[in-house]
């Protein structure tokens, strides 16, 4: 016969303590009045958002719709990643409290609720406990929230606010009452938090809705949360559940059950007795595993539901771009090359936070610029630097992500010749005022010449250096007076730029 409390295989059948059929006791377990409390029973696999109706027993309670998340199909919104592992099974529910759409349009009253018709009503003046897990992504996308529990006297009141996505919470419509709420936060990281609300309804409640509070969120982004394992039952059925003492990642974490007179206690880990652990409070942390407590009272044997102690590991993925000469300190690793890196840190609760980092190291950023100017001009096309003489220049700039960028500038003068004197005396040498150039000059679009009183003496278009181009020094067929004349010419250069040049030329007879 097996002794069920000494961690030995007394009857030599290879089975120890609770793992032996000789030690079977009735298990204490609250039965949830909410059908399908962990969303595991389903009629379909979600392929997109707003498919909570795939979960048996659940109703899209509000016009803004909640989401069923399941690895068989739709696994959630990009950026709003649920914490893993899930508390119970593979399915969870996601809901928003306010949202931002379009170009920063904030819809504070966009509130998403899930509802259910209870398997049996909550009786007036009886006490009940609502236990559930709420999941958080991070402090920005899932800030602290007053999780709120609503009830109604008839299942006919589900759903509510039909056709009105701005209704807000259920009590903004008829026949709903707020039953209770609890302010919950995720500690700044990705986490599941077990929460409870104790209620005593004043009238029989046949249907419930859960989600955000009635107050506007006031957030400037879409805030989003997750639900799993929603258990609603008579308060007495929760009396001997195992409770956590301190955070599961802390070294002094332990477990407890309520203390009552005339009950003897025995703790078990993975079905094997922890010898000497016979008090309601487990004396120390025995590590990860499945814990139960056997309760003996006047010959009756009851066994608590199993509590699985698993130290949570928080996983986060991020990416970063580095400049070619930059070194990033990532934990104990100095990163200066592209690649995927993983490092484990400790969060504020002493939990392991595994961060996966994708690093892209940019190559040296270089650019070459070839530019031309006319003598006397200034080139200012590289940041705020100005150059007025030919040469080769290296200019350091900052890119839009803060990396050094080197610009190699090659600056030249346009090869265009503007005579400053000509002699229209028909001797065959320097008889015309002609602008000339090599391949830098594509076209002389206009050439206008004025005397010292501003009177036009010559106007030409589409000119180029040939025998008939330019000014022959005559004004209305008569040789102009000797003196200084002003010219304005519009040139098209080989780089496609149009330049207007103003200068003067001396006519000598």
Image (spheres, rainbow, N blue to C red):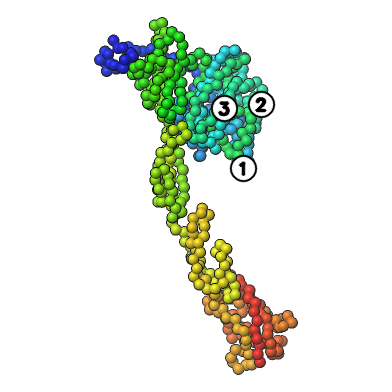
Q: Is mark 1 on a helix, strand or loop?
A: loop
Image point 40% across, 18% down: which residue? 292
Q: Residue 183 carries which label?
A: 3
Q: Which residue lies furthest to the bottom in this view?
A: 427
Image point 63% across, 41% down: which residue? 105
Q: Pinpoint residue 184: horizontal percent, then vertical percent.
A: 54, 28
Q: Compared with residue 429, is residue 124 higher up or lower down, i.e. above or below?
A: above
Image point 38% across, 26% down: which residue? 288
Q: Which of 326 and 469 is in front in this view?
A: 326
Q: Do the residues labelled 2 and 3 touch (CB within 8 Å)?
A: no
Circle 3 crowding by C-alpha within 10 Å: few under 14, some 14–19, many from 20: few
Circle 1 crowding by C-alpha within 10 Å: few under 14, some 14–19, many from 20: few
Q: Which of 207 and 202 is in front in this view?
A: 202
Q: Pinpoint residue 358: horizontal percent, then vertical percent.
A: 43, 46
Q: In this view, does 7 lie to the left or right of 312?
A: left
Circle 2 crowding by C-alpha within 10 Å: few under 14, some 14–19, many from 20: few
Residue 252 seen in render:
yes
Q: Residue furthest top?
A: 298
Q: Is mark 2 on a helix, strand or loop?
A: helix
Q: Which mark is residue 172?
A: 2
Image point 63% across, 21% down: which residue? 177
Q: How far apart are marks 3 and 1 (CA)?
A: 27 Å
Residue annotated with mark 1:
104
Q: Nearer the viewer, residue 73 or 405?
A: 405
Q: Is residue 355 left or right of residue 398?
A: left
Q: Are marks 3 and 1 in contact (CB under 8 Å)?
A: no
Comes first in the chain, label 2 or label 3: 2
Q: In this view, does 473 lie to the left or right of 356?
A: right
Q: Are marks 1 and 2 in contact (CB under 8 Å)?
A: no
The nearer-to-camera label among 2 and 3 is 3
Which quarter of the image is occupied by the N terminus? Answer: top left
Q: Distance between the residues labelled 1 and 2?
A: 26 Å
């Amino acid at each position: 016969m097996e002794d069920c409390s000494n961690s030995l295989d007394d009857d030599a059948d290879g089975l120890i303590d609770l793992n032996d059929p000789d030690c079977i006791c009735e298990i204490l377990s609250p039965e949830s009045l909410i059908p399908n409390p962990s969303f595991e029973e389903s009629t379909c696999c979600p392929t997109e958002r707003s498919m909570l109706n795939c979960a048996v027993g659940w109703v899209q309670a509000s016009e803004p719709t909640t989401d069923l998340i399941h690895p068989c199909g739709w696994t959630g919104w990009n950026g709003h990643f649920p914490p893993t592992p899930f508390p119970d099974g593979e399915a969870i529910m996601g809901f928003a409290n306010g949202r931002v759409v379009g170009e920063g349009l904030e819809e504070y009253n966009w509130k998403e609720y899930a509802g259910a018709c209870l398997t049996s009503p909550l009786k007036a003046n009886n006490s009940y406990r609502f236990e559930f897990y709420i999941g958080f992504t991070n402090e920005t996308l899932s800030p602290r929230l007053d999780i709120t529990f609503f009830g109604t006297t008839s299942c006919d009141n589900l759903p509510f606010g039909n056709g009105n996505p701005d209704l807000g919470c259920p009590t903004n419509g008829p026949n709903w009452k707020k039953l209770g709420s609890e302010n919950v936060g995720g500690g700044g990281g990705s986490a599941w938090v077990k929460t409870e609300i104790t209620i005593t309804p004043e009238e029989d409640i046949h249907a419930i809705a859960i989600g955000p509070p009635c107050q506007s969120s006031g957030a400037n982004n879409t805030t989003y949360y997750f639900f799993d394992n929603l258990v609603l039952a008579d308060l007495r059925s929760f009396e001997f559940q195992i409770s956590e003492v301190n955070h599961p990642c802390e070294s002094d974490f332990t477990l407890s059950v309520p203390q009552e007179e005339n009950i003897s206690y025995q703790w078990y880990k993975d079905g094997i007795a922890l010898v000497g652990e016979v008090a309601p409070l487990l004396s120390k942390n025995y590590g990860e595993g499945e814990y139960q407590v056997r309760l003996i009272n006047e010959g009756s044997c009851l066994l608590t539901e199993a509590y699985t102690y698993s130290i949570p590991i928080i996983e986060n993925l991020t990416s970063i771009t580095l400049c070619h000469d930059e070194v990033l300190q990532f934990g104990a690793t100095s990163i200066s090359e592209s690649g995927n890196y993983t490092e484990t840190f400790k969060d504020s609760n002493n939990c392991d936070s595994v961060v996966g980092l994708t690093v892209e190291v940019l190559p040296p950023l270089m650019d070459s610029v070839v530019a031309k100017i006319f003598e006397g001009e200034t080139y200012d096309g590289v940041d705020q630097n100005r150059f007025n003489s030919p040469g080769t220049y290296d200019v350091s700039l900052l890119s839009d992500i803060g990396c050094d960028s080197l610009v190699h500038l090659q600056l030249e003068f346009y090869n265009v010749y503007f005579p400053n004197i000509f002699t229209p005396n028909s001797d065959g040498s320097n008889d015309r005022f002609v602008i000339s150039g090599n391949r830098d000059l594509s076209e002389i679009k206009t050439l206008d010449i004025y005397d010292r009183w501003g009177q036009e003496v010559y106007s030409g278009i589409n000119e180029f250096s040939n025998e008939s181009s330019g000014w022959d020094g005559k004004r209305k067929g008569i040789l102009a007076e000797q003196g200084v004349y002003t010219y304005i010419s519009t040139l098209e250069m080989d780089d496609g730029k149009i330049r207007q040049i103003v200068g003067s030329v001396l006519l000598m007879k």
